[in-house]
Amino acid sequence: MMESFDQQKKWDSVELRRLVDEGIFIKCQEKTEHMALHPFWLSNPLQGIEEDLEQSLGKWKKKLGGYLVCYKNVRKDQKISPLMNADTPWVHVDYKAKLYIYKPQIGQKLRGTVKRVGEKAAVCVFFNFFSVSVKPRHDSKFDTWTYGTELEFTVTSTFHRGKGPEIRAICNRVLNVI
């Protein structure tokens, strides 16, 4: 289950570099992509591209093989396709951007914040919009886990869905209790 995508998480370059170096994020080097924009964006196609990318955050991108978590340095190519007809009045544009992709993998070590505690597991949010079901190691009680507690966990299973990944994990350690 995912949190709201109303606002893009503001990633700083140090954090992005660390996540790429650790193999958690995949950075696509200045990728050229094609997009069909609504004619409303004809006067400002760059804003339309960014709006479309914003709506794609956290969603599975089959072509990229993961979930889009961040984009940087968006710029449109000089060409705007004049292809328009009555059936599909969309404006076709090409753009370039650095795209950062998250692909959940078994064994990944991540950190998240507890949002809800159940009888046998807690729901944590990580990267501000993905959620994961985290169980304690060794079936011990986790009565210290409350809303806002930060956990480090290891991914044990994952299932890809269009809206966001379904992830289960085991807690490695409690980082802080609020």
Image: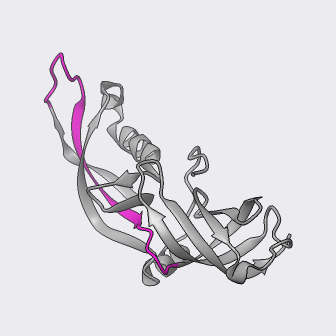
* Residue 12 % position (x, y): 55, 69
Residue in the image at 76% along x and 59% along y: 118
What colour scheme has been applied to the protein in the rendered image? one colour
| Residue 38 found in image quarter | top left
* Residue 171 % position (x, y): 66, 78
- Seen from the viewer's position, the closer of residues 119 and 134 is 119
Residue in the image at 84% along x and 74% along y: 177
Residue in the image at 61% along x and 59% along y: 128
Count how many numbered circles sit on residues in the image: 0
Q: Is residue 77 positioned above or below 139 on the image?
A: above
Question: Position of 54 compared to 172: left or right?
Answer: left
Residue in the image at 65% along x and 69% along y: 134
| Residue 70 appears in the rendering | no
| Residue 145 appears in the rendering | yes
- Seen from the viewer's position, the closer of residues 85 and 25 is 25
Residue 156 among those drawn in magenta: no
Q: Is residue 52 positioned above or below 86 on the image?
A: below
Question: Position of 166 compared to 126: left or right?
Answer: left
* Residue 116 % position (x, y): 75, 57
* Residue 141 % position (x, y): 81, 76
| Residue 50 found in image quarter | top left
| Residue 11 found in image quarter | bottom right
- Extreme residue in the front direction: 139
| Location of the C terminus (image quadrant) | bottom right
- Seen from the viewer's position, the closer of residues 150 and 51 is 150
Question: Position of 27 compared to 131: left or right?
Answer: left
Give the residues drawn in magenta, as a range.
82-108
Question: Position of 167 compared to 91: left or right?
Answer: right
